[in-house]
Structure formats: structure tokens, C-alpha cells
């Protein structure tokens, strides 16, 4: 019996609950300081304790995962805390999905290239803070849940805000040369949660959410009569479910299908399983994409018992975590694991 394993953060509970529901053994790689949290849940069978998640590529830890016959499910922490170099070069246990596409998520230039190949035109980007001539959002590298993002409309604002966030401990000063500067798109933030099955060559939409971010989403709770000087930050603290107008759904599926095709063209074998396209709907009702995530996103945690969209597709409760387990089970039964693991 295969074991489904993942790192203990982000969406681990959803992933391992879905795996247990489909009859798999489950294993969590957890920082020892958080092991008590995961001990509360009976659907987790095995624990591998680490001081830091990067230890998962140490020889002893890899042997433990191999002896458990593990399939590792990637999520954002694998990118931010382990890093794509180690995932590609040293993490020799099989990964559900395309491990090489994680680099395209982490590298802003590769990300931009893949989006444009898919016909997803992101807002203009700027190579240097000195080029800023309009309202921009400045993003740090990695998958850190919006930590360190800020707004700037000219070079002076960029440097002043960056330095202020460094003093507040929200930004590492060494990252100044690595930031990604993108024109700010005004609209309602939307995150589309897709699943692509190579077994069926089928794309499903399993959920839609938006993020609740501090302090940008809390500034509106301060009455206008109070004059406050707050630089908004974009640290994600939770997610909110959202149902889209049905007339917009055809475009949503077409975007996802275009992304799947582009990923096959540029990053063989292409996207496998969950991914997310992120952007905003502007005042015209036009979707402006600005990001993608090439793996499960934390917003899927909203739908552990299923979403309005998964309910239209399945006759049982289907989280993204369980859908991954279903795909692994089907591939194992048909001897097609090579189609979904790298």
C-alpha cells in the first residue's frame, strides 16, 4: 500500500484526510514544535519530525520516506522552505505532479513566460524601481503568503516603503534586488482552483476563493474621519469562498485549458493535478491575471467537504486533497503512476 506524505503546514490536514478517505496510509513531515497539533488528528498514521523542513532531503529522512513507500504531495511550503533546487536535485521520493514546473512558479520571469504562452496577459512589469511611473505592487520571491508585498507609485516611495518594512522586520534587506514589480490591477481578487487529470485529459474547476489579507483588507474598517498613515501589507490570514456569475464560467474553463496546453509545450510533462490562476475582475467585468500556482493552494482548505463546483461534478464530498488521492488510486490500479508522478 502506497503512503501519501506531505509537509506539515499549508494544507496538510486536507491532503491527509483526503488520502485516508481513499484508503491510503498517511505520513506527515512536521517541525517538532508543531507536532502536537497534528497528533490531534487520527487520520495521520506516521510522523517524521524535523527541526526545519529543509531536512526532508537529508539521507536519513529520505530513507524513512522511501521505506514507507511514500508519494509526496507538494504545496507552497515545499517551495518556500525547501526550495526548488533541492526538490529537483535531492528529493528523490516520487512527487505527485510535475516537480519541474515548481521552478516556473518560483521564478517571476519564467512565470510571466508561461502565462503569456497561455494567453494570460499579466499587468506590465518593471525591471527596476527607477522605472516605476504608476501604482505598482512589489512582490518578494517565493511562496510566502503575501509577506513583504507593498505598493509604490514612484522610485522614492519604493525605497522609503521598502526601508520601513525592513525596520518592522517584514522584509529581509538582502531581497531588494530580487523583488518583482508589477503594475497594480484594480479589481476584485479571484483565485480559481483547477484540477487537471492526465488519465482522462480532463480539466475540472473545484472551487473559487479570495484571500483575506492584513492590513489591506482591514483598513476599510477605520472610519474616514480618522486620519491614519498606514502602509498596507498583504499577508494572507485566511480565505473566503466565492461563487462566480455563471455567465463568466466559460471563460474560466478556457483559461484553465489554455494554461494546461501551454504547460505541456514549455515544461514537459505539463501540469498534473491541482493548480490555481489568480487575478482580479475589473470594473468592466474583465479578468486580469497576475499569478499562477502550479500545485494545490491553501484556499482549497475552504472546501474539505466539497465546494458548489465539486458538487456539480461528483456524487460525494470531494476536496482537492481527496481528488489527488483519487487520481493516485486510479493510476495505481491501472499501472499508470508514471503519468502522474515525477
Image (cartoon, rainbow, N blue to C red):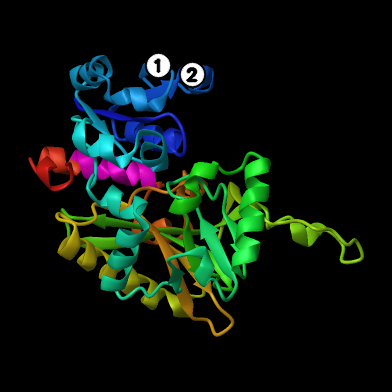
Q: Is residue 270 magenta?
A: no
As helix, strand or loop, the secondary structure at mark 1 comes to strand
Question: Label 1: few (<14), some or many (≥20) within 10 Å?
Answer: some
Which residue is painted at 26% across and 43% down in the image?
Answer: 326
Q: Is residue 126 left or right of residue 162?
A: left
Check disc 1 and report the residue beneath it.
Answer: 49
Front-most of residues 231 and 270: 231
> Residue tagged by mark 2?
35
| Residue at 42 percent of width and 74 percent of height | 249
Which element carries disc 2, helix, strand or loop?
A: helix
Furthest residue toward left: 335
Prevailing SS of the magenta stretch: helix
Task: Check the picture and name the quadrant holding the C terminus.
Answer: top left
Between 201 and 310, the one lying in front of the other is 201
Give whichever of discs 1 and 2 has the lower sequence position: 2
Q: Which residues are magenta?
A: 320-329
Above or below for 130 versus 28:
below
Q: Quadrant of residue 14?
A: top left
Tag 1 and tag 2, C-beta contact below 8 Å = yes
Dot 2 surroundings within 10 Å: few (below 14), some, or many (20 or more)?
some
Quarter occupied by the N terminus: top left
In the foreground, 121 or 192: 121
Relative side of 226 to 121, left or right: right
Amino acid at each position: 500500500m502506497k503512503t501519501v506524505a506531505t509537509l506539515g503546514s499549508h494544507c496538510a490536514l486536507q491532503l491527509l484526510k483526503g488520502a485516508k478517505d481513499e484508503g491510503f496510509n498517511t505520513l506527515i513531515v512536521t517541525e517538532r514544535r508543531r507536532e502536537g497539533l497534528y497528533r490531534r488528528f487520527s487520520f495521520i498514521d506516521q510522523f517524521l519530525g524535523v527541526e526545519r523542513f529543509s531536512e526532508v532531503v537529508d539521507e536519513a529522512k529520505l530513507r524513512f520516506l522511501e521505506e514507507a513507500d511514500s508519494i509526496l504531495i507538494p504545496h507552497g511550503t515545499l517551495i518556500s522552505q525547501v526550495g526548488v533546487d533541492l526538490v529537483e536535485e535531492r528529493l528523490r521520493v516520487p512527487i505527485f505532479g510535475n516537480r519541474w514546473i515548481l521552478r516556473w512558479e518560483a521564478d517571476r520571469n519564467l512565470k510571466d513566460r508561461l502565462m503569456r504562452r497561455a494567453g494570460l496577459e499579466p499587468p506590465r512589469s518593471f525591471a527596476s524601481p527607477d522605472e516605476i511611473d504608476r501604482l505598482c505592487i512589489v512582490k518578494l520571491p517565493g511562496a510566502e503568503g503575501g509577506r513583504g508585498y507593498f505598493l509604490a507609485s514612484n522610485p522614492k516611495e519604493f525605497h522609503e516603503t521598502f526601508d520601513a518594512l525592513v525596520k518592522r522586520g517584514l522584509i529581509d534587506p538582502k531581497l531588494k534586488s530580487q523583488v518583482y514589480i508589477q503594475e497594480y490591477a484594480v479589481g476584485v481578487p479571484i483565485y480559481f482552483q483547477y484540477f487537471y487529470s492526465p488519465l482522462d485529459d480532463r480539466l475540472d474547476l473545484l472551487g473559487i476563493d479570495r484571500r483575506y489579507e492584513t492590513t489591506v483588507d482591514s483598513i476599510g474598517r477605520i472610519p474616514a474621519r480618522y486620519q491614519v498613515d498606514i502602509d498596507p501589507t498583504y499577508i494572507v490570514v485566511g480565505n473566503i469562498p466565492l461563487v462566480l456569475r455563471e455567465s463568466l464560467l466559460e471563460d474560466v474553463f478556457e483559461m484553465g485549458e489554455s494554461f494546461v496546453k501551454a504547460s505541456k509545450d514549455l515544461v514537459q510533462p505539463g501540469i498534473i493535478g491541482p493548480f490555481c490562476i489568480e487575478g482580479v475582475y475589473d470594473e468592466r467585468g474583465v479578468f486580469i491575471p497576475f499569478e499562477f500556482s502550479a500545485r494545490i493552494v491553501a484556499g482549497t482548505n475552504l472546501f474539505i467537504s466539497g465546494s458548489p463546483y465539486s458538487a456539480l461534478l461528483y456524487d460525494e464530498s470531494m476536496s482537492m486533497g481527496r481528488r489527488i488521492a483519487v487520481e493516485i488510486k486510479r493510476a495505481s490500479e491501472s499501472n499508470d503512476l508514471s503519468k502522474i508522478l515525477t
